[in-house]
Image: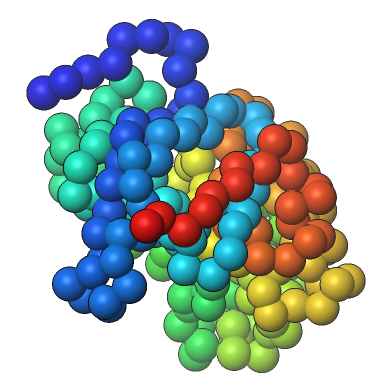
């Protein structure tokens, strides 16, 4: 399998990736020869108009969608060469626009269960620490269905932390929050980057608060 050996490369890199959704949606190509790298210790926003392929770009980077052409690398390892366990762990770091959780479970139980779903059984204290990092330690015993939309976003972030993620893909991190709620989520993402040194957060920005907070936003246009 092809390998990249340059140690200075980004944590995740897409090389001339093409994705065609024409058969499924009738919209045509979603990505056309997209090449982008996501460096460590940065908060990166992917911005662009609707149907430009922002979510597709992140889903390809997270191993959730296979490109029709091109290659995706995590570090020096090509995604095509990863085994099921590696792919499961990587895919678990994609946080969708609508956070996935079990409403009847407590916030603590949701974090612990998400960790097990990636194949890693975290220490009990790891879930508690993750909730503390996102400011939800006082809500540990509360059912997820009772959390506000902003708190559910925090819970989604916390659910990724016990596995010791190297990268986090967050689709629409501030939607459908108001301006104040969006700011709070961005504060959490920035703080997490500092606590987990050498980590990366990648976000798809649909609101100005995300784009202006990020360094070096990646702008994407519709493929034709």
The one of 24 and 135 positioned closer to us in this rendering = 24
Res. 197 image quadrant: top right
Protein image colouring: rainbow
Q: Is residue 46 above or below residue 166?
A: below
| Residue drawn at x 41%, y 67% as measured from the top left | 113
Residue furthest to the left in view is 1
Where is residue 206? Give x, y as percent.
Answer: 66, 65
Q: How many marks?
A: 0
Point out the image quarter for the N terminus.
top left
Q: Is residue 210 above or below residue 71?
A: below
Q: Is residue 38 above or below residue 192?
A: above
Let me know if residue 156 appears in the view. no
Q: Is residue 161 above or below residue 43?
A: below
Point out the image quarter for the C terminus.
bottom left
Let me know if residue 4 appears in the view. yes
Q: From the viewer's perspective, is 32 left or right of 208? A: left
Where is residue 108? Give x, y as percent.
Answer: 57, 69
Res. 142 image quadrant: bottom right
Q: From the viewer's perspective, is 24 left or right of 180? A: left
Where is residue 126? Give x, y as percent.
Answer: 55, 50
| Residue drawn at x 54%, y 62% as measured from the top left | 171
Where is residue 26? Give x, y as percent.
Answer: 26, 77
Res. 35 image quadrant: top left
| Residue drawn at x 72%, y 84% as measured from the top left | 148
| Residue drawn at x 47%, y 58% as measured from the top left | 222
Q: From the viewer's perspective, is 137 left or right of 17? A: right
The one of 69 and 222 positioned closer to us in this rendering = 222
Residue furthest to the front in view is 224
């Amino acid at each position: 399998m092809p390998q990249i050996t340059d140690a200075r490369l980004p944590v995740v890199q897409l090389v001339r990736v093409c994705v065609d959704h024409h058969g499924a949606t009738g919209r045509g190509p979603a990505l056309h020869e997209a090449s982008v790298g996501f460096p460590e210790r940065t908060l990166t926003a992917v911005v662009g108009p609707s149907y430009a392929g922002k979510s597709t770009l992140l889903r390809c980077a997270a191993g959730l969608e296979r490109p029709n052409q091109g290659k995706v690398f995590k570090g020096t390892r090509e995604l095509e060469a990863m085994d099921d366990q590696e792919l499961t762990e990587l895919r678990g770091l994609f946080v969708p626009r609508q956070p996935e959780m079990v409403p009847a479970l407590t916030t603590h139980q949701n974090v612990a269960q998400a960790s097990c779903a990636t194949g890693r059984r975290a220490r009990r204290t790891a879930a508690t620490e993750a909730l503390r990092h996102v400011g939800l330690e006082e809500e540990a015993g509360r059912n997820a269905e009772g959390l506000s939309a902003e708190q559910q976003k925090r819970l989604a972030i916390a659910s990724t932390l016990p596995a010791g993620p190297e990268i986090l893909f967050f689709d629409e991190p501030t939607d459908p929050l108001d301006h104040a709620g969006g700011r709070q989520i961005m504060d959490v993402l920035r703080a997490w980057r500092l606590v987990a040194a050498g980590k990366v957060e990648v976000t798809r920005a649909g609101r100005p608060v995300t784009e202006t907070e990020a360094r070096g936003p990646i702008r994407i246009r519709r493929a034709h």
